[in-house]
Image (cartoon, coloured by chain):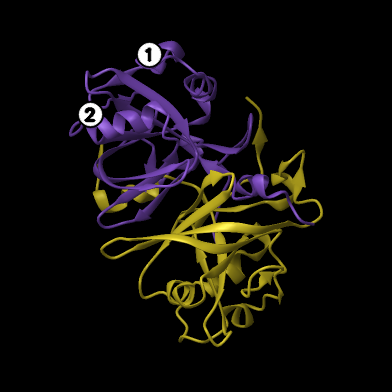
Chain colours: A purple, B yellow
Amino acid sequence: MLVDLEDAYRLIAPRPIVLITTVDKDGRINAAPISWVTPVESEPPIVIFSTSYESDTYRNVSETEEFVLNLVPERIKKQMYTCGKSFPRGVNELEKAGLNWEPSEKVKPPRIVECPVNLECKLDWIHQGPEYVVVAGRVVAAHAQKGAMKAGRLNVEQVKPLLHVSGKNFVIGDHETGL
Amino acid sequence: MLVDLEDAYRLIAPRPIVLITTVDKDGRINAAPISWVTPVESEPPIVIFSTSYESDTYRNVSETEEFVLNLVPERIKKQMYTCGKSFPRGVNELEKAGLNWEPSEKVKPPRIVECPVNLECKLDWIHQGPEYVVVAGRVVAAHAQKGAMKAGRLNVEQVKPLLHVSGKNFVIGDHETGL
């Protein structure tokens, strides 16, 4: 059957969710959940996400050219959802959600403590669409918590990554299989 | 712990896998699996994927400016893997893998019959990286098989989407949860 075109994006799913941390030029922290995210190159490692021109994430990246991708595990799904609510510019969503942060190694935006994986990124390029903007970052430091990797890959049974289907519907991606 | 930068992309996972069908200027069919794919806009629906300059997918898109994203369910994982092997240009991977195809509505590349979701796309923009290329397409027709959607979203229990972790390791994304 034919699907309404505005629903098409829901069919490339379920997708990993990241909380993107940024800071504005005064150092104020922002965190926003995004599931329109993917690597686009391995060496050098480049990751992209898509957002709106009006988002604090985009404004902050425009000002400071840095961001951190924090992978969202199932256990913080409610906190992730809180971060996605609309707060005035300058409000730290991590505080509102009760999440903790610590300094990054190479960029100003912080790493989220409750996230098992953090990728510190510097702006590489931007594609400006009519009403969306694709932001590409080069990963300059990658962190994984103890147990978050096995044999060089994500340890999905331990991490239990939260994947977005649509709206408030998610998949827990902890069900590994081989070829 | 710090992770080697060349492994960073493995940590934004697990990711949906699509088989991208394209045709060259002579109409010869190509199919390639890619998990570096995401929507970037809902209205109009824009999806992007990343590939190499040398890939048949990129060459064909350059020639004919069309492609189809076919979502990969668990039940065709071996066929998907066969499509990812290296064949000479002009070989139809769908034939090699024993997959079936049918004409699309609005573009020349075919839809894969065994894939529950097919998004027909026309080239919208390209970002040329040093050794990778990001291809963005506008969805011009979206198809879902009977049972592949429920309540306007992907029916993950029925579709059992195959998600890529790394190498030959996958997650079956059929384990839905609410907030």
Q: Residue A132: x percent and y percent?
A: 46, 41
**Above or below, A147 relative to B6:** above
Q: Chain of mark 1?
A: A
Q: Kindly indicate the quadrant of the structure image that contains residue B75.
A: bottom right
Residue located 56% across and 60% down the image: B18
Q: Amino acid at mark 2?
A: Ser
B130 or B171, which is in the foreground? Answer: B130
Q: Is A172 left or right of A146, judged from the image as shown?
A: right
Q: Give the crowd class for mark 2: few <14, some 14-19, many >=20 residues within 10 Å.
A: some
Q: Residue B62: x percent and y percent?
A: 44, 74
B104 or A161, which is in the foreground? Answer: B104
Residue located 56% across and 68% down the image: B67
Q: Residue A124: x percent and y percent?
A: 26, 47
Residue denoted by label 2: A104
> Whole-Å distance between the Cαs marked 2 and 1?
20 Å
The quadrant of the rendering that contains the N terminus of chain A is: bottom right
**Above or below, B94 relative to A87:** below
Residue denoted by label 1: A91
Farthest-out residue, left: A106
- The reply to whether residue B122 is in sight is yes
Q: Chain of mark 2?
A: A
Residue located 23% across and 19% down the image: A27
